[in-house]
Image: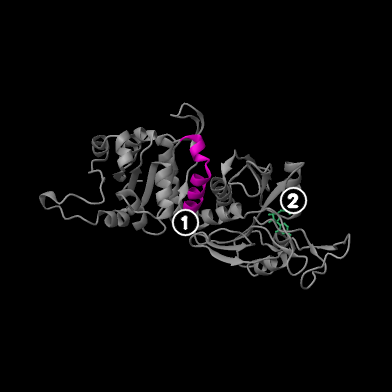
């Protein structure tokens, strides 16, 4: 942390009262800290307290006064250039909305736009639990995550609204630990730096005729979150995506496919060269044996569709891989979950499998959260709590980092 330039943004939530303590902790670690306070933030925490703990003028207005010959009109740009990391704690629903829309109507949001690419951006949403899970806030969070920001899920507990739920800003010590980790991760210190990572994501579509197909409910969100997390660590990520409605994560090479056969053809190109292959796609197990041309007519009362098995892409990679390459899979199970996941780990010759608990509300297809259990080849098993898919992806990638040759322990 010593010598690192950190911007701490504070927007208008009650948790702002904790942020001077974060500034103090950072200063103690030898970081240079500049604080940006929004109008709302200033209602909850004093500018004087922040100036005192940071030892710096607090940035408030985008338009500095011209008194006493002040001509520093480009603070928002110089701050963006100066920062090694940008943190907003607390980040209110309103600030998240402005950031996701690219609005620049105050010092904080304008500075966000001027940050240099690749620098860690950590946002700590803090608000009432129902506000946090509202579709608007979740949509803005997804947009910001797709841009490469790290969004830290708030803690669960008592909220200022008098209710209990998800919405509490983590304690300053925990924010400091997260920041330290992400500064390390953003640098060449990550064992994933420069590694070639191939990820399959989303569903596949298997044609029945010219206008119909067999598919599944996969949204691709988990695979895209994994791609984001690996790219943030400096990996060279190739994302082979089935038909999904998701933006390509920053710095990721994307290749769109439709059917399992197309996905296999693309994936195969990387089998020899990649360091890590992650099968996050929900690949259709079967495809119609003889897809028809044009649109089938509904002349018959009953038709029979003959299906043939698709190639198991991940198992193929598992079979061909060298001991230095890692094969990672997902196992979405509705019964005998852990047992089946362990069988797949062995059968497909994987190094790690993420057993995906499935209930369609908190975990599995389409939703924004997931409950994973990470099972390693050596039997080490880690049960994760319900997390956003981004947070679950971080946990998965951290485990993969430890499995890389030279880091195994
Ligand atoms: O056997 P099952 O489909 O449950 O295994 C799931 C894992 O295998 C996932 O990681 C998935 O991406 C991968 N898979 C694959 N090709 C298939 C079927 C599954 O890569 N045809």
- Residue 311, labelled with which disc? none
**Rounded to the nearest whole Å, what is the CA distance between mark 1 and mark 2?**
34 Å
- Tell me if residue 238 comes above or below residue 90 in the rendering: below
Question: What residue is shown at x 36% (from left), y 53% (from top)?
Answer: 112
Asked whether 127 or 314 is in front, the reply is: 127
Percent of width and height locating residue 257 = 65, 66
- The residue carrying mark 1 is 147
Asked whether 118 or 41 is in front, the reply is: 41
Whichever of callouts 1 and 2 sits on the residue coming sooner in the sequence is 1
Residue at the farthest top position:
162
Point out the quarter of the image occupied by ligand 1.
bottom right
- Give the number of marks: 2
How many residues crowd mark 2 within 10 Å: few (<14), some (14–19), many (20+)?
Answer: some
- The residue carrying mark 2 is 344
Residue at the farthest left position:
68
Circle 2: element type: helix
Side of 298 relative to 67 (left or right): right
Asked whether 75 or 65 is in front, the reply is: 65
Q: Magenta region: which residues?
A: 128-145
């Amino acid at each position: 942390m010593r010598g690192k330039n950190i911007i701490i943004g504070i927007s208008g939530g009650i948790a702002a009262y904790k942020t001077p303590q974060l500034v103090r902790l950072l200063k103690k670690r030898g970081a240079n800290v500049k604080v940006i306070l929004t109008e709302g933030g200033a209602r909850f925490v004093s500018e004087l307290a922040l100036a005192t703990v940071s030892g710096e003028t607090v940035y408030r207005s985008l338009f500095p006064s011209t008194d006493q010959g002040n001509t520093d009109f480009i603070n928002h740009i110089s701050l963006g250039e100066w920062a090694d990391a940008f943190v907003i704690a607390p980040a209110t629903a309103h600030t998240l909305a402005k950031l996701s829309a690219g609005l620049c109507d105050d010092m904080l949001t304008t500075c966000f736009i001027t940050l240099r690419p690749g620098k860690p951006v950590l946002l700590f949403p803090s608000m009432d639990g129902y506000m946090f899970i509202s579709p608007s806030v979740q949509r803005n969070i997804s947009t910001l995550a797709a841009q490469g920001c790290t969004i830290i899920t708030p803690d669960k507990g008592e909220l200022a609204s008098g209710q209990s739920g998800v919405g509490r800003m983590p304690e300053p010590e925990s924010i400091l630990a997260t920041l330290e980790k992400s500064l390390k991760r953003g640098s060449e210190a990550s064992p994933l730096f420069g590694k070639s990572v191939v990820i399959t994501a989303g569903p596949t579509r298997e044609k029945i005729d010219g206008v119909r197909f067999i598919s599944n409910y996969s949204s691709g969100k988990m695979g895209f979150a994994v791609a984001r997390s690996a790219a943030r660590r400096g990996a060279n990520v190739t994302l082979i995506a089935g038909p999904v409605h998701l933006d390509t994560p920053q710095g990721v090479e994307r290749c769109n496919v439709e059917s399992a056969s197309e996905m296999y053809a693309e994936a195969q190109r990387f089998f020899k060269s990649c360091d890590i292959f992650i099968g996050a796609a929900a690949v259709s197990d079967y495809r119609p044996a003889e897809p028809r041309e044009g649109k089938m007519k509904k002349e018959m009362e009953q038709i029979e569709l003959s299906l043939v098995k698709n190639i198991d892409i991940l198992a193929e990679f598992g079979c061909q891989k060298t001991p230095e390459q890692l094969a990672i899979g997902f196992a979405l199970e509705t019964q005998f979950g852990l047992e089946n996941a362990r069988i797949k780990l062995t059968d497909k010759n994987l190094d790690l499998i993420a057993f995906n608990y499935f209930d369609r509300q908190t975990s599995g297809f389409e939703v924004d959260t997931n409950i994973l259990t990470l099972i390693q080849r050596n039997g080490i098993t880690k049960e994760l709590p319900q997390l956003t898919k981004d947070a679950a992806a971080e946990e998965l990638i951290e485990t993969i980092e430890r499995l890389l040759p030279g880091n195994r322990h």
